[in-house]
């Protein structure tokens, strides 16, 4: 594997290989914070044109745990403010020795252009491109689900019913999961108000929860990607589509996921985020293991990984 741009490119076997590798790393991380020599001599650049807490920090930590040299690039404070474009920025970083670029960009397809248009020969990992893809998020979601369902290594998510709820329209997390989770054998339904999920067959979340999903994945309402308001008000959205305390009690056996950052009180209540079935912090923790597994596969040898 030279790049990771989309979950569309992952076969079931490859996805399970990544999950199993991350699962092993996660167990090792529990016992020790020592470094592994896998990426000694390699340089990893986190190239972020959009804000991030979880993804950027976990990629940085993952690369450091694997003994790579790490450079963090944020577009703010860089030559991007003087008009430098993505191609020139990537080529500049490659000239400085970057072996891999971890790219977050507001333009869908930015990572694909870097990887396949000859703009750079560094490996590219898509850390979120516009509304298109966020493959390592879906992988960490799948690992969290597998752990939450107590499914053992080597297996997928066969027969599990996963309900993805909310702002499907703007969600690269949804798109990556809508591809990966069925590859792993899960049955996935994506629901939300008509403006976010055209053709949704449910009027509200109560109706959707009547299908008794094994897990409910709530999505952040991405107001920063809307040119005009697509929901009548936060209160109305929460009333029809928010995961309230009452709705959590409607599905007491369902696992709860949210990629973060959460809009508490809008798409998810604090009760849901902190309930005993919530995987929110496991998702964050698994982000480190998944990113270590992906970087090892892309830049290290399989045996070292
Ligand atoms: N889930 C996610 O991508 O979070 P960040 O924006 O904090 O990286």
Image (cartoon, helix red, strand yellow):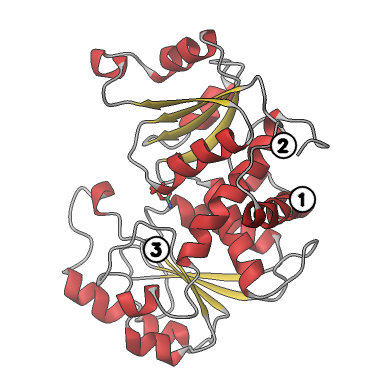
Which residue does the numbered mark 1 point to in the structure image?
17
Q: In whole angstroms, how far apart are the C-alphas of marks 2 and 3?
A: 29 Å
Which residue does the numbered mark 3 point to in the structure image?
219
Q: Which badge, 3 or 1, comes first in the chain's sequence?
A: 1
Q: Position of 78 compared to 180: left or right?
A: left
Q: In whole angstroms, how far apart are the C-alphas of marks 2 and 1?
A: 10 Å
Q: Position of residue 286 (x, y in %)?
A: 57, 56
Secondary structure of the residue carrying numbered label 3: loop
In front of the other: label 2 or label 3? 2
Q: Which badge, 2 or 3, comes first in the chain's sequence?
A: 3
The image shows residue 250, relative to residue 157, as above or below, that is below
| Numbered circles on residues, count | 3
Q: Residue at x 34, y 37 (%)?
A: 50
Q: Residue at x 54, y 76 (%)?
A: 215
Q: Is mark 1 within 8 Å of ligand 1?
A: no
Q: Position of residue 120 (x, y in %)?
A: 56, 16
The image shows residue 197, relative to residue 203, as above or below, that is above
Q: Position of residue 145 (x, y in %)?
A: 61, 68
CB contact under 8 Å: marks 2 and 1:
yes
Q: Would you identify the image quadrant in which residue 148 lies?
A: bottom right
Q: Position of 161 compared to 278: left or right?
A: right
Which residue does the numbered mark 2 point to in the structure image?
297
How packed mark 2 is, by other alpha carbons closer than 10 Å (few <14, some 14-19, many 20 or more), is many
Q: Is mark 3 within 8 Å of ligand 1?
A: no
**Does residue 230 appear in this view?**
yes
Q: Residue at x 65, y 19 (%)?
A: 41
CB contact under 8 Å: marks 3 and 1:
no
Secondary structure of the residue carrying numbered label 2: helix
Q: In whole angstroms, how far apart are the C-alphas of marks 3 and 1?
A: 27 Å
Q: Which badge, 2 or 1, comes first in the chain's sequence?
A: 1
Q: Position of 203 compared to 298: left or right?
A: left
**Does residue 242 appear in this view?**
no
């Amino acid at each position: 594997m030279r790049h990771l741009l989309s979950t569309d490119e992952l076969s079931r076997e490859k996805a399970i290989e990544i999950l199993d590798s991350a699962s092993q790393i996660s167990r090792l991380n529990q016992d020790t914070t020592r470094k592994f020599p896998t990426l000694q001599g390699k340089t990893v650049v986190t190239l972020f044109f959009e804000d991030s807490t979880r993804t950027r920090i976990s990629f940085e930590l993952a690369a450091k745990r694997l003994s790579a040299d790490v450079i963090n690039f944020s577009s703010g404070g860089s030559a991007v403010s003087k008009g430098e474009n993505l191609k020139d920025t990537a080529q500049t970083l490659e000239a400085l020795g970057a072996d891999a670029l971890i790219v977050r960009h507001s333009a869908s397809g930015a990572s694909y252009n870097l990887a396949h248009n000859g703009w750079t020969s560094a490996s590219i990992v898509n850390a979120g491109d516009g509304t298109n893809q966020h493959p390592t998020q879906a992988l960490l979601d799948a690992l969290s689900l597998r752990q939450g369902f107590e499914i053992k290594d080597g297996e997928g998510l066969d027969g599990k019913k996963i309900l993805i709820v909310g702002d499907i329209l703007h969600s690269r997390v949804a798109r990556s999961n809508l591809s990966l989770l069925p590859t792993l054998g899960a049955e996935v339904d994506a629901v939300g108000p008509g403006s976010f999920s055209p053709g949704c067959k449910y009027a509200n979340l109560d109706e959707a929860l009547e299908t008794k999903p094994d897990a409910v994945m709530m999505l952040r309402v991405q107001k920063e990607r809307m040119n005009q308001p697509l929901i009548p008000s936060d209160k109305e959205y929460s009333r029809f589509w928010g995961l309230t305390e009452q709705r959590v009690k409607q599905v007491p056996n369902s696992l709860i996921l949210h990629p973060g950052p959460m809009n508490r009180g809008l798409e998810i209540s604090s009760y849901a985020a902190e309930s005993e079935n919530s995987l929110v912090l496991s998702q964050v923790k698994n982000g480190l293991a998944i990113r270590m597994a992906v970087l090892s596969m892309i830049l290290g040898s399989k045996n070292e990984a």
